[in-house]
Image (tube, helix red, strand yellow):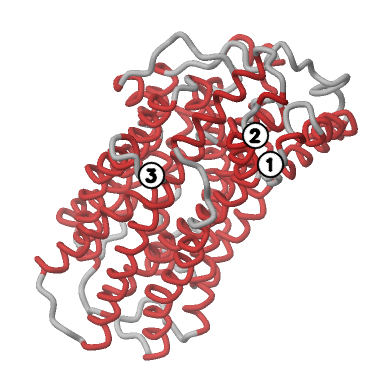
Amino acid sequence: MKPTERRVGYGTAIGYGVTDLFGGGAFAVIGTWLLFFYTTYCGLSVLEAGSIFAIARVIDAILSPIMGYITDNFANTWLGKKFGRRRFFLLISAPMMFLYALVWVTDMSYWYYLGTYLSIELLSAMVLVPWETLSSEMTNRFSERTRLSGVRMICSQLGGLLAVSIPGVIMQFTGKDNPMTYTYTGIIFACIFCLAVFTTWMCTWEAKDVREEFEPEPLGARSGNLWHHLKSLVLDLLSSFKIRMFRQHIIIYIFSFTALDVFGAVFTYYVVYGLHLDASAVSGYLTVAALASVPSTFGFMMLLEKMNMTPSGALRLAYGIIFCVLAFLFYVYITEMAVSVLLFSGVFAVFGFARAGLYYIPWNIYSFIPDVDEIVTKKRREGIFAGVMVLTRKSTVALAIMLIGIVLQESGFVKGQGVQPDSALDAIIGLLVFATAALLAVSFYMTFKFKLTRETHKMLIQEVARLKLGGNLQDCTPECQKVIKDLTGYQYQEVWGGRATHKAVRNEIAAG
C-alpha cells in the first residue's frame, strides 16, 4: 500500500479509537456481569446461560470471517464505491446499537435471551471487523499506527472502566440487588456505543488504492457465484495461518485474553462467595483496575516507542505482575486474611497497569501483520486478518463463560443461594487462580519465539518498498533475509513472486 498523504494526529486517532468503547466496553460488561445477570435475575441455570454463549460461538465462527471477506471485496459493489468498503458498515451499524439494551431485560424466555445475544454478535461483527482494518488503511507509518493503536486501547480501557463503574454507580440509586441496575446499564451503553461508532464514521478514511497496480487480479477472482466466494473465503482464512508471525500472535492473543476473560467472569463469584462481600465491592475493585489501565496504556506506548522495549519484553513484564496478583488472591482466600480496602485497591491498581499492557500490545502488533503478509502474497488483506482477530476475541470471552458455567454446575453451585458448598468454592478459586495462570503461561512461553520489533518491521517495510520499485531479489542482505524468514516462516526466495506467492495466486484461481 502506498503511503497516504493525510497525517494522523491525536484528534483523528481519538475519532478512530472511540469505537473501542464498544469493542472493549460491550464485552467487558458481558464478561463481568452477563453470566451473573442470567443466573441471578433471569431464571436461567448456569448450563442454560452457558449454552447461549456456545450457540453464539458456532454462528460467529462463520460470521466474522465472512465479514472480513466481504469488506475486502465490498469496493466492487455500488454501495462500496459510494460509501467505502469499510466505513459503510459503520454508518448503518450506529443506530442499531440500541439492540444492546434489549439484552438486559429480565423475566423473558430462554429463546429471547438467545436471540438478543445473537443480535449483538451480528452487530459486533458488522462494526469491529471493518473498523479493525482502518488503522492499516489510514497510514503505513509506524509512529502513526502506534498512535492509533494506543489511543484505541485507551478508549477500550475507558470502555472497561465504564463497564465496571456504571453498574456500581447505578446500584447506589437502585439498590444492590435490583435487576433494573443492569437494564439501565444496557440503555446507557447503547447510547454511548451509537455516538462512538458514528463519530468514527465521520473522522476516518480509507486508502483509495488498496490493490497495487503491479499485482492484477487473477482471472475470475472476486467475481462469480456464491460457491466461488465461499471457496475464496475458506482459502483466504486458511492461508492467513501460514504466516508464522500471525500464528504466534494468535496464540499469544487467544491465551492472554482468555485468561482475563476467565478472571473477569469468576472474580464476581470470588468476591461474593469466597470473601463474603457484596457485588458493589466487585465494581469498586475493578473500577480501580480500570482507572489505572487508562494512563498505563500510555505508559506502555512510551515503553515501546521511546524506550524501545520489544513487544515480547513488555508482555513478559505484564504477565509477571499478573502472576503476583493471582498469588496474592490465592493467599487471601486460603488464609482468610482480613485485607484493608486500601491494600486491595493498591493491588488492583497494579493489576490494572499489567492488564493495560496485555490488552494494548497484541492489538498494536495486529496492525503490522498485513505488512508481513504483503511480502508473501503481494496483497493487502486487512479484512481477513481482522475477521480472524474479531472471531477469536469474541470466541474466547463466550467460550470462557460457557466453560465456567459447566464447571460451576458440575461443582454443585446453586443459583441464587447465598452460601455455596465447598466444592463450588474450590472450583471458583481454581478457575480464578490456576486456570488464569495456566493460560498466561502459554503466552509467556510464546513471547520468546516472537521476533517482531521496531527494527525488524522497519527492515521489512524498506524491503517491500525496494521490491516495489523494481529492486532485484538477489540484492537483499543476509540479515534482511533472516528477518523475513523469522516473520513469515518462508525462505526469502519463496516470497514476492516465489513459490509462496504463486501458491496464493493459484488458490484464488482454483476458487474461481
Q: Is residue 104 visible?
A: no
Tell me what residue is drawn at x 45 percent, y 50 percent: 103
Q: Residue furthest bottom?
A: 422
| Percent of width and height locating residue 344 | 16, 68
Q: Which residue is mark 3?
A: 360
- Disc nearer the start of the sequence (2/1): 1
- Disc nearer the start of the sequence (3/2): 3
Q: Which mark is residue 251?
A: none
Q: Is residue 198 visible?
A: yes
The three-letter code of the residue at mark 2 reads Asp
335 left or right of 322 in image: left
Front-most of residues 350 and 31: 350
Q: Secondary structure at mark 3?
A: helix
- Disc nearer the start of the sequence (1/3): 1
Tell me what residue is drawn at x 65 percent, y 29 percent: 374
Badge 1 density bin: few <14, some 14–19, many ≥20, Cα 10 Å: some
The three-letter code of the residue at mark 1 reads Ser
Q: Which residue is mark 2?
A: 373
Task: Indicate which label's residue lies in the foreground, 2 or 1.
Answer: 2
Q: Is residue 205 above or below residue 29?
A: above
Front-most of residues 358 and 177: 358
| Percent of width and height locating residue 96 | 48, 32
| Percent of width and height locating residue 464 | 62, 23
Quarter occupied by residue 330: bottom left
Tell me what residue is drawn at x 50 percent, y 72 percent: 405
The three-letter code of the residue at mark 3 reads Tyr
